């Protein structure tokens, strides 16, 4: 494949798909399991993504969860922000809710990206996002962290009388909203830019709302990549959810 000939979204899609296929192969045939499998998957997927992106975009910088951070990126307009295996523990435990994130931030905005869901045989990307949304269900569905759902998220779900659905990877949760299996993804309690850059790019391309939980814009390629909270939801629900979050935080 001529990686350098792909546009940004197509590059993100192809790289995420290839890393997802590699991770499936390793889980099925490497002989590793548990924490050792997770470490192998993190390392192998990171190596693949770094190689593909450097070949295709040699002038761009890369911020990866699994690589040393080169702070020179902070002065650059274009930075790829990747999580080679989002949901390492879920992957190592044999679950399906893990993902590969390949996102591109330009001037601090999540602009292009792809999220691969290998166990669903899906890659959602900004070049072909689903945009047709069904009417809202009678009872809203809110996805949140399966293992670290905070009291704030639980209270907002209760205030909405929403079904609370626990999932692993941030990408898996965000794509559940993108593909219509959920209506709201609310996170409070700690993430980094690689956890949500690609999911946010795809969600926005699909016409969804994405912001911090106080309504502030999400900014990327910051010197400190900590980005501790996130709301992705149907656009028509954003004002209501943000108001409830504000009330619950007072």
Image (cartoon, rainbow, N blue to C red):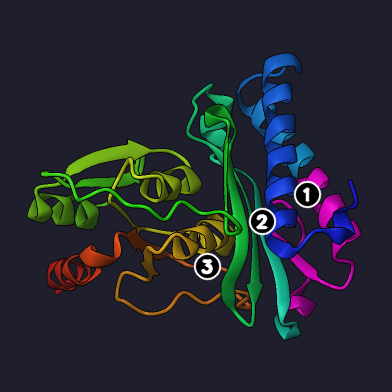
- The one nearer the camera, 58 or 228, is 58
Residue that mark 2 sits on:
82
Question: What's the mark number on residue 226?
Answer: 3
Of tags 3 and 1, the one toward the viewer is: 1
Alpha-carbon distance for marks 3 and 1?
Answer: 22 Å
Residues at badges 3 and 1 in contact (C-beta under 8 Å)? no
Residue farthest along the bottom direction in this orientation: 75
Q: Determine if residue 94 is in view.
A: yes
Alpha-carbon distance for marks 2 and 1?
Answer: 8 Å
Question: What's the mark number on residue 49?
Answer: 1
Q: Is-magenta flag for residue 87?
A: no
Element under label 1? Answer: helix
Q: Determine if residue 146 is in view.
A: no
Of tags 2 and 3, the one toward the viewer is: 2
Seen in the picture, residue 139 relative to 195 is either above or below; the reply is above
Residue 233 left/right relative to 78? left
Seen in the picture, residue 35 relative to 182 is either above or below; the reply is above
Rendered residue at 50%/28% (across/down): 96
Q: Which residues are magenta?
A: 46-73
Residues at badges 2 and 3 in contact (C-beta under 8 Å)? no
For the residue carrying disc 1, how many other residues have a C-alpha within 10 Å: few (<14), some (14-19), or many (20+)?
Answer: many
């Amino acid at each position: 494949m001529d990686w350098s000939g792909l546009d940004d979204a197509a590059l993100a899609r192809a790289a995420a798909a290839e890393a997802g296929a590699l991770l499936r192969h390793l889980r099925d045939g490497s002989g590793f399991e548990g924490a050792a499998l997770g470490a192998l998957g993190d390392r192998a997927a990171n190596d693949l993504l770094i190689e593909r992106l450097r070949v295709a975009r040699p002038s761009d910088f890369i911020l990866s969860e699994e690589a040393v951070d080169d702070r020179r990126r902070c002065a650059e307009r274009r930075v790829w922000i990747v999580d080679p295996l989002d949901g390492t523990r879920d992957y190592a435990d044999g679950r399906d809710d893990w993902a590969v994130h390949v996102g591109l931030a330009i001037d601090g905005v999540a602009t292009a990206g792809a999220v691969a869901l290998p166990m669903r045989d899906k890659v959602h990307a900004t070049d072909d996002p689903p945009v047709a949304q069904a009417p809202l269900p009678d009872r809203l569905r809110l996805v949140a962290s399966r293992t670290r759902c905070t009291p704030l998220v639980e209270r907002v779900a209760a205030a909405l009388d929403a079904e609370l659905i626990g999932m692993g990877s941030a990408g898996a949760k965000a794509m559940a909203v993108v593909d219509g299996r959920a209506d709201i993804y609310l996170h409070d309690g700690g993430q980094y830019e690689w956890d949500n850059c690609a999911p946010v790019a795809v969600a926005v391309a699909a016409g969804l709302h994405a912001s911090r939980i106080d309504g502030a814009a999400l900014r990327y390629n910051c010197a400190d990549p900590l980005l501790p909270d996130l709301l992705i939801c149907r656009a028509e629900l954003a004002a209501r959810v943000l108001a409830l979050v504000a009330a619950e935080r007072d």
